[in-house]
Amino acid sequence: MLKIVVATNNAHKVEELSAMFEGKVELLSLKDVGIQIDPEENGKTYAENAFIKAEAVTHFTSLPVMSDDSGIEIDELGDHFPGIYSHRYALENGGQEKLNKFLSLNHANSKARFTCHIVLLNLNFKGERLDFEGIMEGYINSKVEGEHGFGYDPIFVPNGYKHSVATLPPDEKNQISHRFNASKKVLKYLKENGNI
Ligand code: ITT
């Protein structure tokens, strides 16, 4: 089975990606392959940041490397904001829990979306760079709810739903999420190119 190293330090992402690629690709975490890195994500787009993370890992393995850069965009906060700064924005605003409370109180019903870019490096030849985008549209909840998922899941309601992503069992999130939508494109590419 095709082996790919996942260049992320976020254990939730590895879990979600593993569920999506299960049985088709063997995903190895940085922990599995004994790589410890945390490169500075100073890109201007999700794809640039994902390439920075993946690129850093290629110095330690000859296997193909995948990485995920993702974030939430809340229309009332501005164009594509916090977007690529989603992680930092939570850290700078008292932590995720406090920020989620603030956003649900002050920005309920604002249109919002999660975006994910999954990039692949060195799949078929050294230097190959591939980028796949996935989006989940929705809005900000008026309360913090649910125990599943991570990050902004407790305050994000996908279009067509009444409750936050964090109220959904993991396998349900994994059928509608931005990460799922990007993963679907990755799997399609791998099939079409004879990698799996
Ligand atoms: P790595 O850089 O090591 O991959 P990270 O958590 O810092 O881990 P990002 O730089 O991509 O990852 O930051 C994305 C942030 O956006 C993440 O910390 C969450 O706060 C949020 N986010 C991304 N996907 C999410 C999801 O599925 N559910 C909830 N929040 C999400």
Image: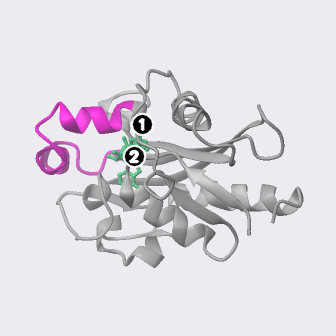
> Hey, what amino acid is under mark 1?
Ile
> Mark 2 highlights which residue?
112
Q: Which structural element holds mark 2? A: strand
Q: Which structural element holds mark 1? A: loop
Q: Is mark 2 within 8 Å of ligand 1?
A: no
Magenta stretch holds residue 38: no
Determine whether, in the image, residue 122 is placed left or right of residue 49.
Answer: right
Which residue is pictured at 17% across the width and 60% down the height? 143
Which residue is pictured at 29% across the width and 52% down the height? 151
Magenta stretch holds residue 89: yes
What secondary structure is the stretch in magenta mostly built from? helix
> Hey, what amino acid is under mark 2?
Ala
Residue 133 or 55: which is nearer the viewer?
55
Q: Is residue 44 visible?
A: yes
Q: Which residues are magenta?
A: 85-112
| Quadrant including the C terminus | bottom right
What's the mark number on residue 37? 1
Determine whether, in the image, residue 155 is placed left or right of residue 83.
Answer: left
Return the x and y of residue 172 as percentages of the image width and height.
46, 76
